[in-house]
Image (cartoon, grey):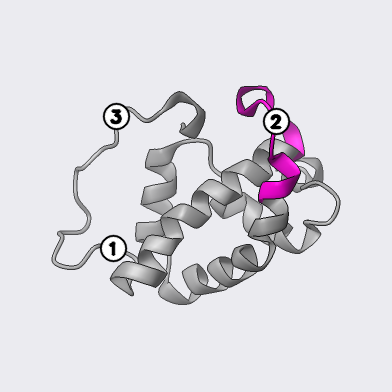
Amino acid sequence: MSAADLSLPPGFEALEPYVAYWATARTQERRERREAASMAAIEEFYSAMLALAPEAIRSLEGRDMEALEGAELRLMHLLLALAHVSMATELHRQPRAPFTPYPHHVRLVEAPRILG
């Protein structure tokens, strides 16, 4: 992955270390990455994203989500990943839902198109 593939819009450079792992295009991939990550890695990403999420949302507000590309699309993918890791930090307090087998064969086969 080149540096350009990891870049984000100006003002969001602090989030670039998280792009390679967390900025995935598919819901299934985001869930799998949350489930595979350590709680320390999840909490680090969660804290970094939470600090910049309001500004990230403002920067994408009013945009055609299906027309996003490049740095803006990566930022959107990070926001979607924030929703996934919030489950681990705010609800489960662990990477996976309590009392669920892991690994498992649950697959998210269809999500709203914009969410991957």
The residue that mark 2 highlights is 63
Disc 2 element: loop
- Residue 86 horizontal side relative to residue 22, left or right: left
| Residue 53 higher or lower than 78, as above or below | below
Number of residues whose C-alpha sits closer than 10 Å to that of mark 2, classed few (under 14), some (14–19) or many (20 or more): few
Identity of the amino acid at label 3?
Answer: Val
Res 96 label: 1
Location of residue 87 (image quadrant)? bottom left
Residue 5 highlighted magenta (yes or no): no
Q: Position of residue 21 (x, y in %)?
A: 56, 53
Q: Which residues are magenta?
A: 57-71
Sequence-earlier tag: 2 or 3:
2
Sequence-earlier tag: 1 or 3:
1
Disc 3 element: loop
50 or 14, nearer to the observer = 50
Q: Write the residue at 32% across / 27% down.
A: 110
The residue that mark 3 highlights is 109
Number of residues whose C-alpha sits closer than 10 Å to that of mark 1, classed few (under 14), some (14–19) or many (20 or more): many
Number of residues whose C-alpha sits closer than 10 Å to that of mark 3, classed few (under 14), some (14–19) or many (20 or more): few
Q: Position of residue 109 (x, y in %)?
A: 29, 29
Magenta residues, dominant SS class: helix
Identity of the amino acid at label 2?
Answer: Arg
- Residue 54 horizontal side relative to residue 9, left or right: left
Q: Position of residue 76 (x, y in %)?
A: 62, 42
Disc 1 versus disc 3: distance between alpha carbons?
19 Å
Disc 2 versus disc 1: distance between alpha carbons?
33 Å
> Residue reaching furthest front?
62
